[in-house]
Image (cartoon, rainbow, N blue to C red):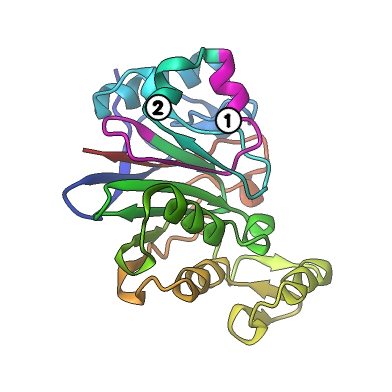
Amino acid sequence: MSRPVLHEYDMGPGVMAFSTTRHGGVGKGNYASFNINYYCGDNPDDIEANRESLCQYLGVDGHHLVYPHQVHGDKVEIIDRQWLEAKSLDERLSCLEGKDAVMTNCTGVCIGVSTADCIPVLIYDPEHHACCAVHAGWRGTVKRIVQKAVTAMAVEYAAAPQQLMAVIGPGISLDSFEVGNEVYEQFELADFDMRRIARKYEKWHIDLWMCNKMQLIELGIPEANIHVAGICTYTHYQDFFSARRMGINSGRIFSGMMLR
C-alpha cells in the first residue's frame, strides 16, 4: 500500500497537524494521486484506498477519521465520545452535512477539512487539549468562520484565545486570487481593512491568509502563535490541489489534526 506524503506542522507534542499533498495515493488524472474527498467526483474505490492508507499511517480506523461536507458556511460540529459511540454512519454523515469546521477534545480521532485554494485553519488549545479544523473560503472568511470557531472552543472547552496556537495552511495567495468587484464589496461591507487585505492590479486581489490571520489576532491570539504556511495552491498545483487552476473536478487537500 502506498503511503500519503504529508506536509506536517509543529504545534507541540500533544497534537499531530498536517495537510496532505497530491503525492502518495492511487488517484488518477486531476485526482492524482491522494484525495479522500467524497464530493468532488473522484473514483470511490480510489477514495477508499487513500482513506485506508491515511488511517493506517495515523493508526486509527475509518470511524475515527472525521470530516464534513462543506458548504462555505459558518457552522461548527463538535465531535465528542458520545458523538463517536452513539451515532450510526448515516447519522454521522447527516450531522456533518453543511458544516465547515469540526472540533474535538477526544484523543485518537483525526478531524479535518478539505480545501483546494480555500484556506484551512488549524487551531490547538494546549491547556485544555482540544483542537479545531476550519474551512475558510472567501465566503466563510467574510462570515468570519474562524472567529466563530474560536468562540465555539471557548464555550465548549473554556479555551482562552491567549493560549491558542493556529496554523493557516496551503491556500491561494494574494497574487493569485483575482476577484471581481462584487467579491471586493462583500469584504468591504463586512468591515475588513481593505488597505491591508486588498491590492489592485488590473483587477482586485484579496489576501485570504491575512484576512484570517487578522481575525485570529482580533480575538486575542498572539501573532507569535500563528503560523502561516505561505504555500500558494494555485502556484504549487503540482504538489497541492487547486480548483482554480485545475477545475472543480479535481482532488482536495485534507488538513487534519489528531490529539495524542
Gap between marks 2 and 1 measured at Cα: 12 Å
Local packing at callout 2 (Cα closer than 10 Å; few below 14, some 14-19, many 20+) is: many
Tell me, for residue 96, which label it has, or none: 1
Q: Is residue 3 left or right of residue 192?
A: left
Determine if the magenta segment contains residue 96: yes
Q: Please tell me which residue lies in front, 118 or 77.
A: 77
Say if 197 sits above or below 104 in the image.
Answer: below
Q: Residue type at mark 2: give it.
A: Leu
The answer to whether residue 187 is left or right of residue 5 is: right
Q: Which residue is mark 2?
A: 65
Residue 235's x, y, as percent? 52, 59
Q: Nearer the viewer, residue 41 or 127?
A: 127
One can see residue 51 in this view: no
Quick one: SS at disc 1?
A: helix
Write the residue at 38% across / 59% down: 167
Query: Where is residue 114 drawn, in percent x and y?
Result: 52, 40
Q: Give SS at disc 2.
A: strand
Q: Residue furthest left?
A: 13
* Amino acid type at image mark 1: Leu
Front of the two marks 2 and 1: 1
State the residue at coordinates (70%, 77%). Answer: 191
Q: Magenta residues, as a range?
A: 90-110
Q: Residue furthest right?
A: 182
Q: Residues within 10 Å of mark 1 (few under 14, many from 20)?
A: many
Residue drawn at (27%, 40%) of the image? 259
In-image side of 152 versus 126 (left or right):
right
